[in-house]
Image (cartoon, rainbow, N blue to C red):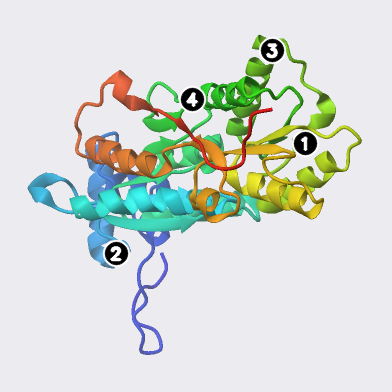
Amino acid sequence: MKNTSPRNGKKQHATIREVAEMAGVSQMTVSRVLNRRESVKKATRDRVDEAIRTLNYRPNLMARSLAGGKSLFIGLIFNNPSNNYLGELLVGTLHRCREAGHHLVIEDFSVTSRDKEVDALVERISGAGLDGVIVAPPVSEDEVILGKLRAAGLRTVLIAPRETPQDSVSVSIDDVAAADQITQYLIERGHKRIAFVIGATDQSSSRRRYRGFDLAMARNGLAVDDTLVMQGDYTYRSGMVAGEQFFSMDDPPTAVFASNDDMAAGVIAAAQRRGKRIPDDVSIVGFDDTAIASAMWPQLTTVRQPIAEMGYQAVNLLAKVIGGNDVSRPEKSIVLDVSIVERDTVRQR
């Protein structure tokens, strides 16, 4: 076992690894004990508790329970290229945490060295003694990370996962229906030659939104022109690159559906660089209704995804799960409504 006595006059804090070594168990088992999971045998739990006392181990945050009205320590894990999306999510999550007196710990997870980064993430969160974590997209689709979080005994609520397993709890929207709705909106305003900018290839929301676009086009007897479908990655720059391709064509689209607002802003910039008037020459719509949609000019017509509400409801669900309350099957997979926000980037043809 590592020596945890003071060195060079400075107190060395015990780590979760040292607790595991002293107790003769894995770090995951220590995490399960810290997170009060009932799956740990009493004898094992006693050994871990004894090691914690001997080493005077203290998590960065002491896990709290709902008993006695104590505050919860909740983690939010994210890795998202859209700062606007994250800003909205934080607004809702922080709002509910403040209302309920909970504390929010934010973990920005950017993969550089895959295995090491995943293990380090789980160890940090496990060692912090968090009561539970909210996992935002695209991390909420990563089965490796989710599996390790569950193995560590951490309660989780997923935002916009690929799918919701039987034992998981999530908050999401119906991306297919939402994309279908905004595409139909363009078609009803006389647009037939409609371009589409796909989001990041590793996110299922990208595929679902394209599917909704394709369904609406097919239902109206309109073929999808492959030259009018461009790959993006949910960033402003990728939208601008796609827009440059669209507006350099001999027969450019009359409308563009970018599958998030950041990319739509990039398409608008590309159109303006080419001397296009919006919406007179081309109509453009986005998805999310983040702050950028109303901050740009002209203001963007878009699908309003209740991102802040998703964060708010995720905190509510996580508190129920942590408190041991039964969460009914319908409540385990909350699907929130979307709407179209009409602004200045679409015109009737």
How many C-alpha atoms fall within 10 Å of the one at disc 2: few (<14), some, or many (≥20)? some
Whether label 4 touches label 2, CB < 8 Å: no
| Quarter of the figure that contains the N terminus | bottom left
What label does residue 218 carry, if any?
Answer: 3
Nearer-N-terminus badge (4/2): 2
Residue 280 seen in render: yes
Spatial CA distance of label 4 from label 2 is 45 Å
Which residue is at a point 31% across and 38% down the rendered structure image? Answer: 313
Label 4, on which residue?
A: 174
Spatial CA distance of label 1 from label 4 is 22 Å
On screen, residue 136 versus residue 169, left or right, reads: right
Nearer-N-terminus badge (1/4): 4
Whether label 4 touches label 3, CB < 8 Å: no
Nearer-N-terminus badge (1/3): 3
Spatial CA distance of label 1 from label 3 is 19 Å
Which of the two residues, 107 or 347, is positioned nearer the viewer here? Answer: 347
Whether label 1 touches label 3, CB < 8 Å: no
Which of the two residues, 321 or 190, is positioned nearer the viewer here? Answer: 190
Which of the two residues, 236 or 59, is positioned nearer the viewer here? Answer: 236
Label 1, on which residue?
A: 230
Nearer-N-terminus badge (3/2): 2
Camera-side mark, 1 or 3: 3
**Residue 241 pos. (x, y %):** 78, 48
Spatial CA distance of label 3 from label 2 is 61 Å
Label 2, on which residue?
A: 57
| Amino acid at dot 1 | Met
Camera-side mark, 3 or 2: 3
